[in-house]
Amino acid sequence: MAADDKNTSSNFIVEGYQFASEADAQKAATDASKIRLLHSRVKASKPTDIKAVYEKAIENKIFKTPIGWEYLTGLRNKLIESGFNKDDIIPIPLDISFSKHSAFADLSVGQRIKPEKREKKADFLKIFSIILNFVLVVLVVLMFVIAATSESDNIINYKSNVTNRYSSWDQDLKEREKKVREAEKKLGIEDTSSYYEETD
């Protein structure tokens, strides 16, 4: 198994640097080819030419791995040896962080520890909400039952109540009319049906 690890990690070695991933190794190989291209095309012997190449490489962010940074460091050292002041030379930017950073590192102790009281309060609110919803549903059902069984007129039973009242009034009127006709017969009053027909 150790032999497998060596074979795998040897695939990621570029210019004496061992990289953690294939993508990083490919970036390093690209930086190495850029350095070879610069050596073949640019014959910088004057310090001003070296400074121009150095600054252009930094401005265009040509190098992204330690191989390129090492090349820039060599150019920087040549510039310092030729008499340039360190403060006049642009520093080499490293756009990565070398220290492991945890999200917990930025949090205070109070933020890292969650108080349990909030969870209990949240549980109480959930239970209270469920009970309240149940009570409201029961009340709505009771309201419909009361509305359906009550004798007062409402939107649910108004038709049957009005029909029942009308039929009872009609029956009362018929009974009274019958009694009036019986009383007329006893008294010997003639048939008054024509009178009732005229008044209708």
Image (spheres, helix red, strand yellow):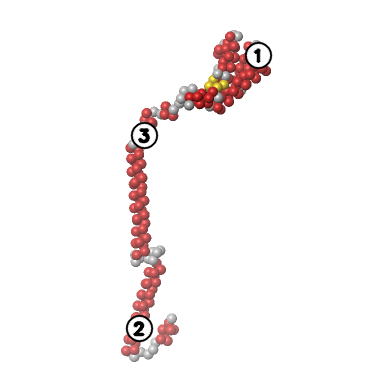
Q: Is residue 169 above or below residue 109?
A: below
Which residue is nearer to you in this view: 124 or 26?
Answer: 26
Question: Residue under circle 3?
Answer: 114
Question: Residue under circle 1?
Answer: 44
Q: CA distance from mark 1 to mark 2?
A: 135 Å
Callout in the foreground (2, 3):
3
Q: Dot 1 lies on which element?
A: loop
Mark earlier in primary sequence (3, 1): 1
One can see residue 86 in this view: yes
- Residue drawn at x 36%, y 49% is 130
Mark earlier in primary sequence (2, 3): 3
Give neighbour class at mark 2: few <14, some 14-19, many 20+ (Cα, 10 Å). few
Check disc 3 and give the amino acid type: Lys
Q: CA distance from mark 2 to mark 3?
A: 88 Å
Q: Is residue 83 above or below residue 62?
A: above
Q: Position of residue 111 (x, y in %)?
A: 38, 31
Question: Residue under circle 2?
Answer: 178
Check disc 1 and give the amino acid type: Ala
Q: Dot 3 lies on which element?
A: loop
Q: Is residue 194 above or below residue 37?
A: below
Q: Dot 2 lies on which element?
A: helix
